[in-house]
Image (cartoon, rainbow, N blue to C red):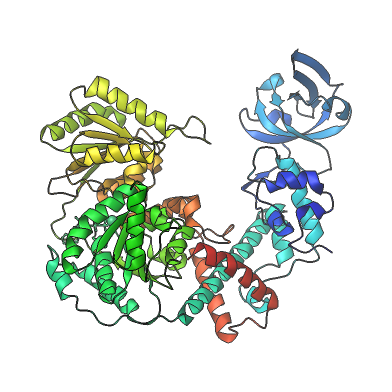
């Protein structure tokens, strides 16, 4: 008797060979297999008379093979099977490539279903390589057919059959993980029905019902997992920080903190003196002054006799933080150290030794902080900047260098509040919703490529006034799999340098350059040695060059709004008036509306809400980043109402039955998900 953890190779009809193919998709167990949900569906339920076929559109016809198929070899390794099919309305010529076996299986006088793209009109209608199936078989035609995400070496047909076998194998053993009362109260279908119909829906209604049930289930267990994580966290106790006098720190700042910054500092200091490890996300728009909030925390903790570390995603950011913070903190008696990958080995060792001996209080660095050789005497606070750039494992690795250190995660990606609650349900959230005074609005315009000349003239004038500019261009999409950013950037930079700005200094940077090369280009730019920097989005993260006043984005339609907002945040960081120009030749109404939002508002949260509404959370975070455990069906962007319902249900259940002892299947599922969630959410 199989269960859901049975390896797929033991499922009847699958075997070792298939199992190997499936493994490429990450499918190893029966549960993986039946949870490999279709990406979309093709409705092949209805046959269309041949005469009614519309050229260019995909359709199914039910037609009789009129004569023996013919085979011809058009060149070596390429054989063509041609067959004529007829129905009452007309004639259809069908061609197949390299499917010679069809010659014998398509029998004159028998009726088959052909599904494919129709071409031609009148008596010249044809289909090339349609899906074909004898009438009445209904495996790949005559029904709604699932279309799965695939990888090379495995076909839709193989996957469909495997899923079919999987569903048959577990029909009798699928445990209904949702407690029955919950299922009934929220009018959700049973689990067997849901799995059957999410793969092989009998009709739209069945599909909707199944989807709703599975999405609800995911969100329900997600909510339960988060609650459990929170409760776990509360059990850990650490020695609370005692009050430290913050006055010298505030007095040393060249400005006074905004009230939003002060609130965040208070919240974080409150956490650190509570006796429970801080686990806080500090969210603030670009330029809102997150670094100072972190600095205040560092000061407070070090004055409590412990050590702090700040990890930045790039070398240049680490250096910038160090250059900004050391002159502030050193005079206050905090011994600072910089630890990045590019330091000579001897120096790295020296810094590590100081940290291990407690002779340095505060380490700023990159991933280099995570290396095995680095140890702290008493690491009490870990700050990670621009957290979405770090894998969870990396954050966890740094935290492990201390005993339950306080954690402060700083993010410049404004996340809509609803989403933050879910994504960071395990973190407390502080929001810096105010910019320091005197910030000027960045003039933003969205234009078509026809304006490029004028934009270049404008750039030139700005540079003549002593300013600098960024030009961002997205990767060239030669094929979807491997967009080539290098080519786009280098080619564009070359054209600019040679044809447009021969007298100016143009440099470029892209993600495929070696860190050291990147570093050198960025440093030259920040020291004013180049005028125009052509780049991919590598400059998106926290780079601070106050003299740069123009941000030009090519093919702006390819970026998400939040990303554009981040890019725009690279200018307007100094005293000079700054500009952002979004160039797009897209004619889509939707794109224009999207870009228009950028010209209308500079509020990162508002932009994020729009982005979420328009693109959904997957795109919002980038597939890899959102890392929501177990959410395959539910879409937090669209299923907001369902989320509320599921959260409510989870809370009520946990209140009545905190250990879920009344529903063992649910308890088991929650435990499984908890193990995954703990991994991906700190
Ligand atoms: P981000 O939130 O993007 O990390 P930073 O911490 O880099 O922002 O701050 C952006 C700039 O604003 C820095 O030059 C910083 O010194 C300055 N700054 C921060 N807080 C204030 C404030 N309260 N008043 C004036 N300037 C500030
Ligand atoms: Mg920052």
Q: Residue furthest bottom?
A: 656
Q: Where is residue 100 shown, x and y percent of the image?
A: 81, 24
Q: Residue drawn at (19%, 40%), measured in percent from left and top?
A: 527
- Tell me which corner region of the image, top left, top right, bottom left or bottom right, holds residue 325: bottom left
Q: Nearer the viewer, residue 608 or 238?
A: 238
- Tell me which corner region of the image, top left, top right, bottom left or bottom right, holds residue 469: top left
Quarter of the image where ligand 1 sits: bottom left
Q: Nearer the viewer, residue 256 or 90?
A: 256
Left or right of 583 in this view: 373:
right
Answer above or below: position of 161 versus 379.
above
- Tell me which corner region of the image, top left, top right, bottom left or bottom right, holds residue 485: top left
Q: Where is residue 145 shown, x and y percent of the image?
A: 70, 46
Left or right of 185 in this view: 332:
left
Answer above or below: position of 508 versus 198.
above
Answer above or below: position of 509 versus 426.
above
The answer to whether any part of residue 630 appears in the image is yes
Q: Residue drawn at (15%, 49%), measured in percent from left and top?
A: 574
**The N terminus - image quarter:** bottom right
Q: Residue drawn at (28%, 68%), measured in percent from left and top?
A: 298
How many numbered markers are drawn?
0
Q: Residue furthest left?
A: 465
Q: Nearer the viewer, residue 189 or 215?
A: 215
Q: Residue drawn at (16%, 55%), measured in percent from left and top?
A: 439
The answer to whether any part of residue 602 appears in the image is no
Q: Where is residue 51 shown, x and y percent of the image?
A: 71, 28
Q: Nearer the viewer, residue 228 or 514?
A: 514
Q: Where is residue 576 shown, x and y percent of the image?
A: 13, 45
């Amino acid at each position: 008797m199989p269960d859901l953890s049975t390896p797929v190779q033991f499922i009847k009809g699958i075997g070792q060979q298939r199992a190997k193919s499936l493994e490429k998709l990450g499918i190893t167990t029966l549960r993986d297999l039946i949870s490999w949900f279709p990406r979309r569906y093709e409705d092949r339920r209805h046959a269309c008379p041949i005469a009614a076929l519309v050229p260019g559109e995909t359709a199914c016809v039910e037609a009789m093979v009129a004569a023996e198929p013919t085979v011809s070899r058009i060149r070596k390794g390429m054989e063509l099977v041609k067959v004529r099919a007829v129905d009452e309305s007309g004639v259809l010529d069908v061609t197949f490539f390299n499917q010679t076996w069809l010659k014998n299986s398509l029998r004159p006088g028998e009726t088959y279903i052909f599904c494919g793209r129709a071409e031609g009109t009148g008596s010249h209608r044809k289909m090339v390589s349609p899906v074909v199936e004898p009438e009445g078989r209904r495996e790949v035609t005559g029904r709604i057919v699932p279309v799965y995400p695939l990888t090379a070496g495995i076909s839709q047909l193989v996957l469909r059959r495997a899923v079919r076998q999987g569903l048959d194998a577990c029909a009798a053993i699928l445990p209904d993980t949702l407690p029955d009362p919950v299922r009934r109260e929220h009018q959700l279908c049973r689990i067997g029905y849901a799995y059957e119909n999410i793969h092989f829906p009998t009709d739209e209604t069945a599909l909707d019902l199944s989807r709703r049930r599975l999405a609800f289930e995911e969100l329900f267990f997600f909510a339960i997992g988060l609650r459990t994580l929170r409760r776990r966290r509360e059990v850990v106790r650490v020695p609370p920080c005692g009050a430290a006098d913050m006055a010298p720190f505030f007095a040393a700042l060249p400005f006074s903190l905004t009230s939003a910054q002060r609130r965040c500092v208070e919240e974080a200091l409150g956490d650190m003196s509570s006796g429970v490890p801080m686990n806080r996300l500090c969210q603030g728009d670009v330029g809102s002054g997150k670094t100072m909030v972190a600095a205040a925390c560092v000061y407070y903790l070090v004055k409590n006799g412990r050590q702090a570390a700040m990890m930045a995603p790039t070398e240049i950011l680490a250096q910038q933080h160090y250059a900004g913070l050391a002159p502030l903190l050193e005079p206050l008696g905090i011994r600072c150290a910089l630890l990045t990958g590019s330091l000579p080995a001897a120096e790295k060792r020296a810094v590590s030794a100081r940290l291990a001996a407690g002779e340095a209080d505060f380490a700023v660095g990159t991933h280099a902080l995570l290396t095995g050789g680095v140890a702290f005497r008493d690491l009490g606070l870990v700050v990670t900047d621009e957290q979405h750039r770090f894998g969870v494992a990396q954050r966890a690795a740094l935290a492990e260098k201390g005993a339950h250190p306080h954690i402060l995660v700083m993010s410049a990606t404004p996340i809509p509040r609803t989403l933050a609650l879910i994504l960071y349900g395990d973190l407390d959230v502080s929001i810096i919703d105010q910019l320091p005074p005197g910030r000027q609005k960045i003039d933003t315009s969205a234009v078509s490529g026809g304006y490029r000349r004028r934009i270049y003239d404008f750039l030139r004038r700005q540079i003549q006034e002593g300013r600098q500019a960024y030009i961002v261009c997205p990767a060239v999409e030669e094929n979807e799999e491997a967009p080539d950013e290098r080519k786009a950037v280098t080619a564009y930079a070359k054209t600019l340098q040679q044809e447009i700005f021969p007298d100016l200094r143009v440099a470029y940077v892209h993600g495929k350059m070696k860190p050291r090369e990147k570093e050198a280009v960025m440093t030259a730019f920040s020291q004013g040695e180049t005028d125009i920097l052509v780049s991919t989005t590598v400059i998106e993260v926290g780079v601070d060059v106050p003299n740069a006043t123009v941000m030009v984005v090519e093919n702006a339609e390819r970026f998400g709004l939040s990303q554009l907002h981040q890019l725009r945040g690279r200018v307007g960081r100094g005293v000079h008036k700054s500009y952002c120009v979004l160039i797009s030749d897209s004619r889509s109404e939707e794109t224009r509306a999207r870009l228009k939002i950028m010209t209308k508002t500079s509020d990162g949260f508002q932009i994020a809400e729009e982005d979420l509404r328009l693109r959904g959370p997957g795109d919002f975070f980038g597939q890899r980043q959102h890392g929501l455990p177990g959410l395959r069906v539910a879409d937090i962007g669209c299923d907001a109402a369902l989320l509320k319902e599921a959260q409510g249900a989870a809370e009520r259940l946990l209140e009545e039955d905190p250990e879920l002892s009344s529903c063992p299947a649910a308890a088991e599922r929650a435990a499984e998900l908890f193990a995954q969630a703990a991994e991906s959410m700190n």
